[in-house]
């Protein structure tokens, strides 16, 4: 397996910092800021390790997983997100990601995820989820079912589109 790590994140600062951090740890790394350049770089390099942001300038990074795996079926993909939800974690793993991590994340966790077995922790939490967290998870599931379409999701939730946009702009509730 090619040990090059491809970092796909649309935030130029985060992308550059993560590439630089990986290189300081002795890992060869390159960054891509959008899906087109990510696929081109993956084809050119055959990257064996991929760090993929879930939200790429408004589009879902999940759509890239099958394309990246078609280029290099042996690559190990880790999905990073600032808006973690169980629904997107399940989808990421079903599509072929080996791990799903919520930002902010330490570099040690990312490196360990490349070495771990595929999947994510499915153990039940000690305490039940709060109503706010349950709402967040439900919204994420319906949003995913509607392929990220805000208007269709708002209709399905019987919610005004602007209200849904405000809820999605907030950070998810932790528990």
Image: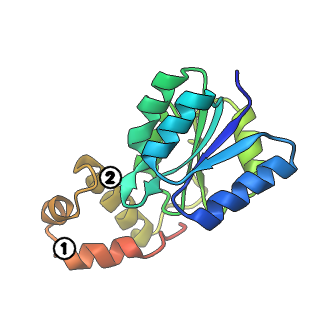
SS class, disc 1: helix
Number of the label disc, if any, that sits on residue 141: 2
* Applied colour scheme: rainbow
Number of the label disc, if any, that sits on residue 161: 1
Q: Is residue 77 above or below residue 25?
A: above
Disc 1 packing (10 Å; few <14; some 14–19; many ≥20): some
For the residues labelled 2 and 1, say whether their Cβ atoms are less than 8 Å apart.
no
Tell me residue 150's x, y (percent).
Answer: 23, 63
**Position of the N terminus by quadrant:** top right
Tell me residue 156's x, y (percent).
Answer: 15, 59
Disc 2 packing (10 Å; few <14; some 14–19; many ≥20): some
Residue in the picture at 55% in, 55% down: 9
Q: Quadrant of residue 118?
A: top right
**What distance separates the C-alpha of mark 2 from that of mark 1?**
16 Å
Q: Is residue 5 left or right of residue 124?
A: right
Q: Nearer the viewer, mark 2 or mark 1?
A: 1
SS class, disc 2: helix
Is residue 91 something that shows in the picture? no
Residue in the picture at 22% in, 57% down: 149
- Viewer-closest of 21 and 156: 21
Q: Earlier in the sequence, mark 2 or mark 1?
A: 2
Residue in the picture at 17% in, 72% down: 159
Tell me residue 87's x, y (percent).
Answer: 40, 48
Residue in the picture at 67% in, 29% down: 117
Q: Is residue 169 above or below residue 108?
A: below
Is residue 33 something that shows in the picture? yes
Number of the label disc, if any, that sits on residue 4: none
Q: Is residue 49 above or below residue 108?
A: above
- Viewer-closest of 40 and 68: 40
Q: Is residue 62 above or below residue 42?
A: below
- Viewer-closest of 34 and 55: 34
Image label count: 2
């Amino acid at each position: 397996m090619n040990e090059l790590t491809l970092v796909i994140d649309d935030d130029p600062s985060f992308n550059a910092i993560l590439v630089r951090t990986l290189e300081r740890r002795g890992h060869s790394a390159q960054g891509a800021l959008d899906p087109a350049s990510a696929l081109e770089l993956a084809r050119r390099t055959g990257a064996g390790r991929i760090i993929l942001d879930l939200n790429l300038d408004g589009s879902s990074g999940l759509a890239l997983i099958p394309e990246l795996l078609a280029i290099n079926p042996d690559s190990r993909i880790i999905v990073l997100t600032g808006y973690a939800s169980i629904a997107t974690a399940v989808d990421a793993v079903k599509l072929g990601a080996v791990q799903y991590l919520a930002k902010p994340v330490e570099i040690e966790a990312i490196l360990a995820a490349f070495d771990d077995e595929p999947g994510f922790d499915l153990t039940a939490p000690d305490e039940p989820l709060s109503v706010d967290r349950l709402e967040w998870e439900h919204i994420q599931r319906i949003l995913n079912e509607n392929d990220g379409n805000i208007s269709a999701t708002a209709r399905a939730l019987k919610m005004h589109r602007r209200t849904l946009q405000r809820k999605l702009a907030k950070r998810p509730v932790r528990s």
